[in-house]
Structures are given as structure tokens and as C-alpha cells.
Image: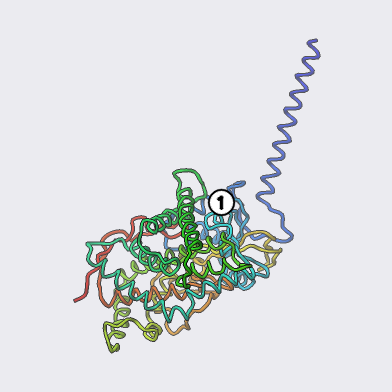
Amino acid sequence: MEFVAFNNLNMMSYVAIGSATLLALWIVHFVFRWKNPRCNGRLPPGSMGLPFLGETFEFFSPNTTTDISPFVKKRMERYGPVFRTSLVGRPVVVSADPDVNYYVFQQEGKLFQSWYPDTFTEIFGRDNVGSLHGFLYKYLKSLVLRLYGPENLKDVLLSEVDKSCCSNLSTWSSKPSIELKEAISTMIFDLTAKKLISYEPSDESESLRKSFVAFIRGLISFPLNVPGTAYHDCMQGRKRAMKVLKSMLDERRNSPAERKCEDFFDHVIEELKKEKPVLTETIALDLMFVLLFASFETTSLALTHGMTYLTNNPKVLKELTEEHETILRNRENPDSGITWKEYKSMKFTFQVIYEIVRLANIVPGIFRKALQDIEIKGYTIPAGWGVMVCPPAVHLNPEIYEDPLTFNPWRWQDKPEITGGTKQFMAFGGGLRFCVGADFSKSLMAVFLHCLVTKYSWKAIKGGNTVRTPGLGFPDGFHIQLIPKA
């Protein structure tokens, strides 16, 4: 009996040891496969980091440098301008190479398609415009261009932007100080939301704006969706904003009176009422959400960043002011609004704007996905892998821009107007998905600067420091006092 029990104990020990050995072998094999992904060619050099987590923590680690992010720069120095990594559970090839970036953009819809990690998709919606392709994307783009395209910009928006900037600057100048990022964000949100959804100040619309504030704070943060984290606040902000938009959509659709197409929402609803609509309600709501966000957040960040540069560069400010004072002197009626001809004449202003967005680098990465195995620069990008084009690595490349960290608008002198992404400049993206709001953003910045430098001076009170996580932020804000000119 004791002998049988002893044998059973031995057998159980052997089974336990065997199971532990198999588990250990499986773990070793899994870790090896994770670190050495399969590829029908030569993968770019790099590290896949920890299983599942990859190098996500380091990617989202805050930094205060104005140079290329430490995450990208360290790997560029070790592996070169094209390297592999893993972010939020997905294998990604990161490109800081201008030729590779340009190729990726030009092959949109052929070898690559727009793609963002699952966490980004959760934030912006499964049916957001960045996740759509082919005919539907082109249709939505044409729809958006009705609002932000050059024709409407010239005929309608320029005048409305001028009035909004002048009115808000006047209000701000009556206060001891303002936090510039918050003030500009509110100004642009009010302006664009009125065009998109006939926004008027009310409890509901204020709730919508506050929801976007919560959304923005966690937009580019580590994707841990538990209470107390920035990402959780972001998702809750999106949920509240979508609830408000859905309520507005239902109210508009169920309204007994027929409305003229007075805002962008009306055009969307008109499409939804068709017998065979191109849009679904989900796509329409995700579109409105993305447009509201994109209209104000990136431009307010760029303008605030630009104001810190103008504050510390009196020579630039002097030439910028002279250009706009010349416009006023040549105007028959000094109190009339800005004209399209005046706007197009702002040569130095556009140089300032290009330099601001080059250095601001609002977007740390633009994502695409390989549709098949792709050979480029001696490497293979496997089908299904993500590709992150890194604009800051191009904009801050000393081989492209002399003294790249220096604010120098004169570097753009005598260069043609930028109407699309190039190998050297991709602040507004590139290829088929070049930002449809680029012209609107540039006009808003130009008109804001015009109203500012012709009527006000200012002094910095506090803040102005930036942090990247990896998106741009102002942890202490940027507080200034506006002083009306005599």
C-alpha cells in the first residue's frame, strides 16, 4: 500500500514537473516570438519591448524637450531613421525618414491605409473619418470642404473669423490677465460650433464644451480605462459629448418645421433623410465629434505656442507688426473688416505661421497600416503592421532645417505657398488625407495675429512652459495681460 502511494506521489511529481517544463518552454517560445516577429524578409531594427505592453510606457512618458521626443530620438541614434517597436499591443514601424514618409502618404489606398491603434479608435469612434476608406471617405471629405474649403473661406468664414477675433481680444483686454490656451480654445470652439451645429451659449452647449475639455486632457495618454486616470476622463468626456450631439440630432430630425441648410448639421441630416443615404447615424455623429475637436484644439495649441515665441522674439514681432500696420494704412476705411486680398498679401505672416507649426509639432505621429508585405529601404514591413510617420523628426532634422530648434520665420522667405504635404513639411499631414481644415486653420491664425498686433501689446504673466505626453500641453497654462495700443 505504501509502495503504491509512493508511486502515485512520484507520478504526480513527474506530471507537475512536466507541466511546469512545458509551461516554461511555451513562455520562452512566446517571448522569443514576441521579440522576433515572423517576416518574409528583413525587419527594420528595433525592440518589441515587453510582451503585450511593448514600449508603450516609454512612448507616453512625459518630457519637456523642444527637440524630437526622447523615445524617438534614442531609437534613431541606435537603429537609424526607420525602426520597429510595439505600442499598445500592436507591432509598429516608426519612420523618421522623409523619403519613407512621403512614400507612405503617396501610397494611401494602394499599399497603405489610414489606421490608428484600437485605443485611439475607441476615443474617436469606430466610424470616425480617419477609419473610413474609399468612396465613403471621399464623400465625407467633399462634405467637409463645403464648410472649410477655399470658396466658403473667402466668401463667408474670413469675415466671421475677423469679427470673432476682434471681439474676443477686446473682451480679454479688459481683464487683468487671461490664460491664453483656454481663451483661444473657447473662442474657436464658439466660432466653429456655431457653423457646425448652430451653437449658442446655453447650459447644453456649455456642457458640450466642458465634455470636450475632459476629452482633450486624456486624448494622448496611457490607455488605462479605470477611474482616476486621464484616459478614463477622456472616454467619459467623449460619452457625454456624444450624448449631447445625439440629443441635438434627434431634436433636429424630429422638428416638424423644415429648416434651410443653415449649418453643417443640416447638410448631414438632409443626407440621412434620403431613401438610400450614404451616411449612417453613427458615422454622422462620429464625424461631428471629430470636426468639433479638430476645428479648435490643434489651432489653439499652435497659436498659444506661437505666442510664446513672439513674446521672446521682438525682432520677429516688429516685422510682423509692420506688415499688418501697412495693411491698415493702405485701407480706405481703417475700421472695415479684413479682405481676401489683404489676407493673401500677408507674406511674412505666413512665414511666421509655417515656423510656428513646424516647431509646435502638435501631432507626434500619423498612423497608417500596411495592406501587404512592403519592401522599402532594404526592409520589409509585414502586412497588417502599423506604420507611424513621425513629423517632428522631419521638422527638427538639422539636415533639412538649419538650427532647427531656432524660431526663424525668415527660413521660409521666397518659398512657395504650401498647399499639400511635402517630404520636408507635414504639419497638416500629406497625401489623400492632407488636412481639409488646413486653409481654415492658417486663416484663423493669420487673422488673429492681425487683430492682435495692430491693436494690442502684451506681457507674459506666468506659465508658457510645455510638456509632451507625447501630445503638446501647457501644464501651467500661458497667462498674459493684453494692453490696448493708444
Q: Give left or right: position of 461 versus 421.
A: left
Q: Give left or right: position of 44 versus 68.
A: right
Quarter of the figure with residue 178 = bottom left
Residue at position x 75%, y 23% in the image: 12
Residue furthest left as drawn:
486
Judging depth in this view, the residue of 222 and 398 nearest the camera is 222
Residue at position x 31%, y 85% in the image: 327
Residue at position x 45%, y 49% in the image: 233
Question: Badge 1: few (under 14), some or many (20 or more) residues near its Cα, within 10 Å?
Answer: some
Quarter of the figure with residue 139 = bottom right
Judging depth in this view, the residue of 85 and 323 nearest the camera is 323
Judging depth in this view, the residue of 291 and 53 nearest the camera is 291
Q: For numbered disc 1, what is the local secondary structure?
A: loop
Residue 143 spot, x, y in % from top left: 54, 72
Position of the C terminus, as image quadrant, is bottom left
Q: Give left or right: position of 425 versus 484.
A: right
Q: How is the image coloured?
A: rainbow
Residue furthest top as drawn:
1
Position of the N terminus, as image quadrant, is top right
Q: Give left or right: position of 201 versus 267.
A: left
Label 1: which residue? 55
Quarter of the figure with residue 11 = top right
Residue 459 spot, x, y in % from top left: 25, 66
The amino acid sitting under disc 1 is: Glu
Residue 160 spot, x, y in % from top left: 37, 75
Instruction: Tell me if residue 298 comes above or below residue 486 in the rendering.
Output: above
Residue 452 spot, x, y in % from top left: 30, 74
